[in-house]
Amino acid sequence: MQSVLRRLQLGSGIVLLTYLFLHLINHALAIWSLELAGRGLLVALWLWRSIPGTFLLYGAASLHFSLALHTIYARRQWTLGPAEWIRLWAGLSLPLLLIRHAVTTRLASTLYGFEPNYERVVITLLTSGTQGLQLALLAPGWVHGCLGLWFRLRHHPLAQRMKPALLTFAILLPLLSAGGFIQMMRTVETKSFILPPPDPKLVAHQLALDAWRHDLVAIYLVVTISAFVAGQMRNGLERQRQQKNR
């Protein structure tokens, strides 16, 4: 059973890491031009908003999160190495950042017809002062995914030989992505001394979107903390039984 769960975790994680990889690539393309990044975004939207892509992405996200809750609940000890703690922090913090992004893009598109492009997204971020969150958005997921994949592959000789190249790639891609996003902001800002207002559809439904975001964050925190508390209670009961049986 554990081997099946590990395979499911690996498979769903690879899907999510692929999504993050393409997202980082799209941002990095803006180093050359906003138009090129926009073309990459159209390809990504076509891929992930298709019926198979939507099913694959959200199915993988749901499965991966469910398995993470199972791991939190089932863990008997929390004695972890530094890399494991970093991976855990990155994995748990990602949804807090991702929920905001998902609400203002995918949910706004589905419910209110907002069609995102990079210029609109950047304008929204600049006018709301949340551009820093966008820069930090993908880093936790990328770190979590890369570490998780490395923990699975590190025992293979080929992975050990490629370790320097893999490490360089894992560090360089987010830096290029951040550089691309900064270039996007500069491009949008230089088009006009006064930023145009954000999309009216987002403004009109901002309160509803904020409510969605707050509710989703609350649900995520409650479910995650509940899994941890339930696991600790189970561990405590098991220790009590062991002491009684001695």
Image: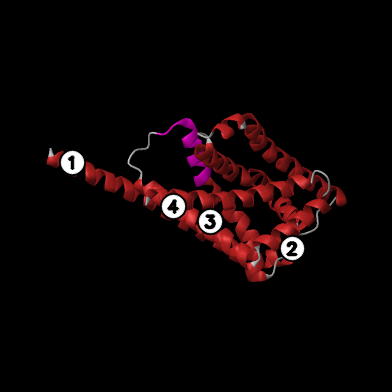
Three-letter code for the amino acid on which mark 1 is drawn: Gln
Pointer 1: what residue? 242
Q: Secondary structure at mark 3?
A: helix
Q: Nearer the viewer, residue 179 or 173?
A: 173
In the rendering, which numbered label is found on residue 100? Answer: none
- At x 61% / y 65%, what residue is drawn? 52
Of labels 2 and 4, earlier in sequence is 4
- 201 left or right of 157 in image: right
Q: Residues within 10 Å of mark 2 (few under 14, many from 20)?
A: some
Identify the magenta region.
80-92
Q: Is residue 120 visible?
A: yes
Of labels 3 and 4, earlier in sequence is 3
Magenta span: chief secondary structure: helix
Pointer 4: what residue? 67
Three-letter code for the amino acid on which mark 3 is drawn: Ala
Q: Which of the image's four quarters has the C terminus?
A: top left
Q: Residues within 10 Å of mark 4 (few under 14, many from 20)?
A: some
Q: Residues within 10 Å of mark 1 (few under 14, many from 20)?
A: few
Pointer 2: what residue? 199
- Type of colouring: secondary structure
Mark 2 vs mark 1, CA separation in Å: 61 Å
Q: Nearer the viewer, residue 72 or 210?
A: 72
Pointer 3: what residue? 61
